[in-house]
Every structure is written in structure tokens, then in C-alpha cells.
Amino acid sequence: MNKKGVALLLAIFTLLIVSLLAVAFLEVTTSDLQIINNHYNRNKALYIAEAGVEFLIDRLERNRSNFSLRSYTFPAGSGDSYAVEYSATSGIIISTGRLASGEQVTLQVKVAATGSRPYTVKILYWKEG
Amino acid sequence: MRQFFIRRQQAGKAFTLVEALLTISILGMVLMAMSPFIRTVYTSWNLSDRKTEMQQNARVALEMVSRYLRQAKRITGIPSSGSGCFVKFRNALDDETLVFFHNIQTTPSNPYYMASDGFISEKDLVMRSIKGNTIVNALIAKSLNTFLVEFRDNAGNIVTEPYNVNNMQISMNFFDAQGFIPDTVDVFTAIAVRPDVRINKPVWVAADSYVLELSKDIQVEEFANPKSVSLNTSTNECWVADTDNGRIKKISPSGVVTVDAGGFSQPLSVSVNSVSGECWVADTGNNRIKKLSSAGSILVDTQGQNPAFLSPNSVSVNPQSGQCWLADTGNSRIRRLSPTGANLLNTRGSSPQFNGPLSVSVNSATGHCWLSDTNNNRIRRITLTGSNSVNRTSYNRPNSVSANPVTGQCWVANTNDNEARKLSANGAVLFAATEINLASSAAANPADDSCWVIDTEREQVVKLDSEANEEFRISGFNSVSSVAPLP
């Protein structure tokens, strides 16, 4: 009697079950990874936008005039950047953090710079989006 | 395999029964041996799937909570111990109150608890939004064992007053609502409060149907168009002219109505004497002036007094002498009453005579009285005998004055010029704040020389610093009419 074929059948059958499970596991893990990745990117863009706000607050302590829209690579050497502007009339800083991958977050921060140089900069409100 | 079958067929033989049984039993044995393994794999797959879902929910909830809190303009309510299961705050534009709370009574107790309603149940995380009289509860996340916020200042110390909060540390623990798995999920984050807008003393505001204390966002309902608030600076109690209800009410610092006196008609102004606790009322519709005791009984009623009052719009008591100044608007007179209501002064004024004065404010240090001589477009100050000590023109229907007894200066709502002015003791304009549309109800704060004033057109309350720079605005009111800060 020749039983070689049955063993092969069994092996294939077992392999199939195990690989199905593996694929299911992989799916769960990758979707989880994707979610974490989105979360990570959003937060990264947010922090880069915050860096833009800090940059303008630092400048406001010395200079209260308008600051027209300009973009800076941040952190240096990365593909990410922030674009910031400030209107002296409205007192609003707008800063957009942008990742190389396209993710972006915009912050709107109203400030008041009072006193004499270096001016005291107070944050009046802090809005996202 | 194919070869195997082909060879069988070629040989012209089928499987024997023994062969088939043998194959099946071997297969069965192998499967049986594998089954615990498969079950384990399946269970753990299920477990991790549930857990992944819980983690996602937790992450979404954390993201939402932190997104709202990052944008908070002011924190207005925290547990008295400095950490606990709720946080009350104002949104970025300061026109809406929001509360995150874990909907179950824990220690320290949660004042926002609501009974399960089929949609929101106990153990859920809820966001309540309050805008005027509209209250909405929204489900943020289900099934939390804990929602804990710790409130700290920049040095990292726990704080117990909402206006001292600089950092919030939030931790949440989620469980599986369906009870499939015993595992729980923890998430944690820290959030900085960036805006430098701090109200660290009570400020009371009257709006269309409620009275609101701004620093802790305490809203007291069931008013009808209240037009005037006055603060007792010794007890922190607030008196309110509940105008359309014809009542005078006293509110405790925590927002409880402790006096509710009726029998008034369209009262437009109240002024409390912080020394005696008594409150003077312009009972405008009845053309009378009344004085209430601290408990709300009537001590003085000018009914029948000659000459009669006509539509008095404003009262201002001098706590040093107990005397009360009032704008007898309909008669275009300014009067001063003794603590018992006797007439001490009744003057038409001179060069020119008063015309429809809407507001009086006595400087308790000097006893002199500032007034907005509205129809003459003047701001004036008169002495105890009624002679002019300040008489300034170039106003446009000013409707409110507020004296600062510490500096001798005075704040004015120069209504139709859409500005608030700060005047020196001799009436010269020191500073002016523009962009306060139809300014009204100026209220000086002698403690920091600041002023609160109302932008009637935009329905905002504006805080000005000692040089009339605008510090911030609070929005979201309806028919906002009067403001009173505690010095």
C-alpha cells in the first residue's frame, strides 16, 4: 500500500490552517500599526506647528510688526516644515505643521504683546484647525 | 497526487474499506491532536482582536479629550482636592462651557452625575456643553473604570483652584463592555493650558435669564432680564435686580439664592452697602427707592415722599456714610438720601441743568458723586452740596460711570462712541478703549485698577487693564446687561 499521498495531504491541510491564522493575525497587527502610525503622524504635525507658534512668540518679544507667511524646514534636515504668519491687526498667529508625507495640522493662536521691549507676550486663545 | 489516483484507476482497484477507515482514523487522530492548538490560537486571536478594539476606542477618547482640553481658554471647575473625575472649562473663544466627567459617583464626588438613560450609562465618559440655557450631553467613550485628572501648576504642585491650573495629567482605564475579556486598557496624557487668561476672583454677570459667576462658571437660573448686579465685598454675596420678574435676589458665593424679595416693578439698579450688608434698590416702575436689610426685609420705602421720584435709574450707596446717591432720571435730578431715606440733597444741577442722567457712582473716599449726564452728553462730578467739581463735555450718550475710590479716578462707558474711558480725578481722559460697541455697565475694580465693561452689540464682557488695554473678552451671552467684579 502507498500512504505517501495521504501524508502530503495532511501536511498541506495543516499548513493551510496555520497560514490562515497567521494571515488573520497579520491583518489585525497591520491595521493596528496603521492606526498608530496615523496617530503618530498627527501628533508629529501638531508639535511641528507648535514649534512654529513658539518661533513667532519669540520674535514677538522683539518685534511686534506683521510677519507674512513663510515656511521653514523643521527639524533641520528633515522633510517636515512649518509655515507661519502673524497679523498685528488681529493679533493672530497661524502656524501649519506639515510632514513630508502630507499630513498637516494648523494652529491659530491669538496673542497680545504689551509693555516695552522685550514685550510681554500673552496667549489669549489657542485653537486647532 | 494525481499520479496516485491515476495509478489506482489504472490498476482498476478502488480503496478498500480498511484503507479508507485507516485514513480517516489517522486524519482524526491528527486533527484531535491539533485541536487544542487551534483552539488556543483562535482564543488568543479573539482576545487580541477585542483588545485592539478597546485600544482604538481608548485612543480615540484620549485624542478627543486632549484636543478639547488643549484648546481650553480657561479652566473653571476642578475637584476640590486637585484631582478627580471631572474638569470644567471654557472653549477657545470663551463662548461655551464644557465639562468632561466620568458618569459615576466616585470620591471626590462627581457633581455632574446623571442617571443612565439607555444611551449614556454609568461608567461612561460624558462631555456636557452649556451655552446659555442650552445643555447637551454627549457620549465620548463607554466603559471606563477610571477617568482621573490631576491639576498642577508650573512647579508641578497639585492646585485646588481652577484659575491656578497650568498642567493637567489625564489617565483613563477602559474595560470590555461586553465582558468577553478580563483585560483592561490604560491610556495617559499630559496637557498644558497655554492661554494666559486668568480670572482669579469672582465676577458676576447678569444676562437674559440667568446670572453667571465667571471665575468658576456658576450659573444661576430663573431670572427674567436682570439689569443690575452689585457685590457685597465683605461677604462675596451678589445682589441682583431681577427686572422683569419685579424681584430682588441675593446669591451666595456658591450660587444659591438666599434672598428673594418681591413687590418691585421693573427695578433697574441695586447697590449693596458692604459694611452694613443692606441693599438699596431703584424700584424704577414704582417710582420709589427702597432699602432692604441683609435678610431681604424692607427697611426704607420712599413712597409718598415729596417731591416724588420719576423713573429712578441708578442708585449708589456710600458704605462709609450709609447715604445713597441716586439718578432721578425722569425728573433730571440727582438726589442723596440719608440711611433712613430722608432727603439730604435734591438738585437739578447747574450750567447746564442735568438732563436724563442714567448713572451715578459715589467715591466713598471723598463722598463726591460721579454721574453720566446722558442727554447733555457730559460726565460730571458733584460735591455733597451739589456743585460741580467736574463738568466735561465731548461724550456721546454715556450711560454708565464707576468711581475708583482708591485712585479718585472714574471709568465711563461712552456708549454711542463705542468706547470706555478712564478719567483722572479732575475729569481728564487718561486712557480710552475703543471697539467696545454700545459700551455699557462700566465696573471699576479698585484692587488692580482694572475695569470690566459690556460690549452690548457683540454681547461680550470685556476686561480692561489699568491703561484701558483690552485684556480679553468673554462671549456667548444673550442680552448681557451688567457686570460686577470682586476687588
Image (tube, coloured by chain):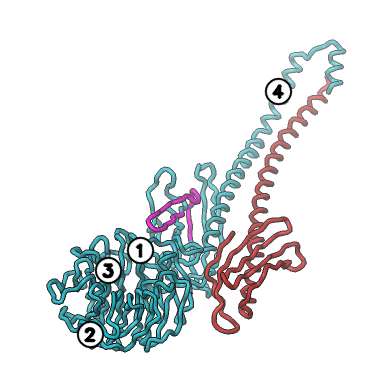
Chain colours: A red, B cyan
Magenta stretch: give its range. Answer: B127-148
Decide if residue B229 is on the left or right side of residue B77. left
Q: Nearer the viewer, mark 3 or mark 4?
A: 3
**Residue that mark 4 sits on:** B25
Tag 1 subunit? B
Crowd tier of the residue under label 2, counting other residues whose Cα lies within 10 Å: few below 14, some 14–19, many 20 or above: few
- Label 3 and label 4: CA atoms lie apart by 98 Å
Across the whole image, how many numbered discs are drawn on residues?
Answer: 4
**What amino acid is at disc 3?**
Leu
- Label 1 and label 4: CA atoms lie apart by 85 Å
Q: Measuring from the top left, give residue B197's x and y in whole percent.
A: 48, 71
**What amino acid is at disc 2?**
Ser
**Residue that mark 1 sits on:** B207
Badges 4 and 2, same chain:
yes
Disc 4, SS: helix
Decide if residue A52 is on the left or right side of residue B455. right
